Amino acid sequence: MRARIRQIGNSKGVIIPASFLAEAGLKTEVEMSLAGRSILIAPLKEELRKGWFDGYRADEDEDAWEGFIALPGEEDEWVW
């Protein structure tokens, strides 16, 4: 597909059709890189586990061992 490079302030841009954006999974931010004389545009990779601890409050955390029942022999000292 041919596209025209347009002047946008001091930069230049290309209009990308919505169908291309949807098929490539592109949202509001992208990764851009050069490969030889080509410009590659790829979806932004999300950080793994991002936001997992948002809202976590250690003071509300319960004791991890609460209610733990040791099996017979587990309380004995181990011999190495």
Image (cartoon, rainbow, N blue to C red):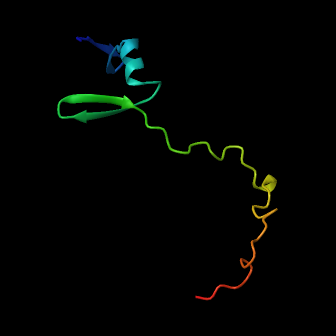
**Where does residue 16 sit, x and y in percent of width and height?**
35, 15
Q: Residue furthest bottom?
A: 79
Q: Is residue 78 shown above or below 61?
A: below
Residue at the image position 43 percent from the left and 34 percent from the top: 44
Q: Nearer the viewer, residue 79 or 36?
A: 79
Q: Nearer the viewer, residue 4 or 53?
A: 53
Q: Is residue 68 shown above or below 77?
A: above
Q: Within the image, what quadrant is residue 7 found in?
A: top left
Q: Nearer the viewer, residue 47 or 68?
A: 68
Q: Within the image, what quadrant is residue 45 found in?
A: top left
Q: Residue furthest front?
A: 72
Q: Is residue 13 shown above or below 57?
A: above
**Where does residue 69 sit, x and y in percent of width and height?**
79, 67
**Is 48 displayed left or right of 6 in the figure?**
right
Residue at the image position 25 percent from the left and 34 percent from the top: 34
Q: Is residue 14 shown above or below 80?
A: above
Instruction: Give the quadrant of the C terminus.
Output: bottom right
**Where does residue 14 sit, x and y in percent of width and height?**
32, 16
Residue at the image position 46 percent from the left and 24 percent from the top: 27
Residue at the image position 76 percent from the left and 64 percent from the top: 65
Instruction: Give the quadrant of the N terminus.
Output: top left
Question: What is the number of callouts on the image?
Answer: 0
